[in-house]
Structure formats: C-alpha cells, structure tokens
Amino acid sequence: EFVLTQSPGTLSLSPGERATLSCRASQSISSSDLAWYQQKPGQSPRLLISGASRRATGIPDRFSGSGSGTDFTLTISRLEPDDFAVYYCQLYGSSPLFGQGTKLEIK
Amino acid sequence: EVHLVESGGGLVQPGGSLRLSCVASGSTFSFHWMHWVRQAPGKGLVWVSRISSDGNIKTYADAVKGRFTISRDNAKTTLYLQMDSLRAEDTAVYYCARDNGDPLGAFDIWGRGTMVTVSS
C-alpha cells in the first residue's frame, strides 16, 4: 500500500521562525506529482505548491517546496501569524493520495 | 474568478442515499477534470472520486467503489456525487475540487464543502 507520511505531526514555532515540514513517500514518486496544501480551521484547503516546488498563484515567496524521490519538504522561511494551520502533502495524478497532515501551531 | 459551491449534504440514516452537487461559476468548467475529497470530523483529507472533463472517465477510491457515482453536466457547470448505501464512516465534509492539470494535476480550486452525517 502506497503511503505518504508527514512529520512532525505537530510543529510548535513562533512568528518569525523558519518552519520545515517533511513528507515521505513509501515509494519513489515523480516530483511533478507532489503538492502541498494549507488548511485553516473551518476553511477548505488552499493549494500552495505543485510539482514539488512551483508556487501557486498568489502564494508568497516565503513558502517554498523541494525534494525528489521519496523525500519532500515544505519550508516557510519566516512565519507570520496567518501561517499557523494544518499542512497536507498530496500525490496527484493517477492515484491521488494525501498525507495525514502536519499541524503548525504557535509556540 | 472561478468559484465552486457544494450543496446537498445533510443527515441520513445508514443505508440511505444522498446526492451532492457542486456548481461552478465561470466558463472553464468543461475543460477540467473534477474531484470529490472528503474530511471526517477532526481528520485529514481523503480523495473520493474524479471525473474527466468530458465525463467519460470515472475513478473511485476503494472505500466508495460500487456505492458512489460521480457525474457531471457541463451545460449546467455542475458536478454531482450520488452516494448510496451510506455508512457511518462516510460521515464527513465533502469538498469538490478542480484539477488544474493537463489532464491531471493539483487541485487548485476548492469549494467550501457540504457536511454529510450518516447516523440513526
């Protein structure tokens, strides 16, 4: 069974700090099929990154994605209060699959 | 700007049926594959189903295969999800989402969701 595992489950940081979120695939995947989403309480998900590193329209450049093979990373360079949310990685394409999410909370 | 608005959720008994709708604004609906994604209370996102832009290709998650049917009416810019033989574990917010790929890509536009509760 193919799995995307996100870590950590919860990340506690302060505004201004750098956040590094990990997404590990159980098998090697094409980086062109990896996305990141942000979801705030009571809201629908918002696309941040597709193709592992391509920012979606309107996404600030403090959000960046990287990685290849089985290991992918979402980095938020300087956290702003609005960034505290749950983040999901996703394998799209032939068999869409989401990771279980990382909650980014204010320390 | 494209918007997606879901409707049709509600409370239904186990074994019952519901039909969800997702109306898209804008003129590009017929060009895009579309998806349903669900989220149980306090849980993560789970992909449910997708349909090709012309409606001819439909794919389902194993958990709903044989019980749910996805369809679309491009003239009405509307996506549907017919849900039969509902179970308690189908309780979730159901989102429709647009695929921005050519043909398959990330989900760039999401609706606000409609809540489905399966309970006696």
Image (spheres, coloured by chain):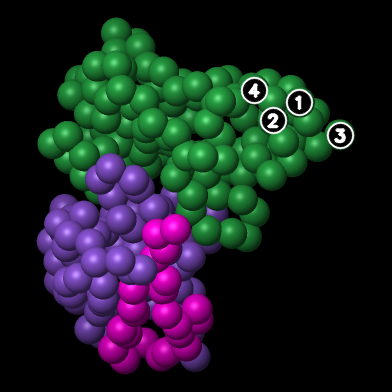
Point out residue A89 in the picture as x, y percentages from the top left corner. 34, 63
Counting residues from the N terminus, which is met first, the one under dot 1 or under dot 4? 1
Q: Regarding mark 2 in the picture, which secondary structure is present there?
A: loop
Task: Say which quarter of the image contains residue A35.
Answer: bottom left
Q: Quadrant of the C terminus of chain B?
A: top right
Labels 4, 3: one chain: yes
The circle drawn on residue B84 is: 4
Residue A33 higher or lower than B115, as above or below: below
Chain that bears disc 4: B
Mark 1 Cα-neighbour bin, 10 Å: few <14, some 14–19, many ≥20: some
**What range of the chain is rendered magenta?**
A1-24
Which residue bears the numbered disc 2?
A: B86
Rendered colour, chain A:
purple
Mark 2 Cα-neighbour bin, 10 Å: few <14, some 14–19, many ≥20: many
The amino acid beneath tag 4 is Asp
Marks 2/4 in contact by CB < 8 Å: the verdict is: yes
Label 2, label 1: how far apart the Cα atoms are: 5 Å
The amino acid beneath tag 1 is Gly
Chain that bears disc 1: B
Q: Regarding mark 4 in the picture, which secondary structure is present there?
A: loop
Labels 2, 4: one chain: yes
Which residue bears the numbered disc 3?
A: B120
Residue A7 falls within the magenta-colored stretch: yes
Q: Which residue occupies the foreground of this view, A93 or A51?
A: A93
Chain that bears disc 2: B
Label 1, label 3: how far apart the Cα atoms are: 10 Å
Label 4, label 3: how far apart the Cα atoms are: 15 Å
Counting residues from the N terminus, which is met first, the one under dot 2 or under dot 1? 1
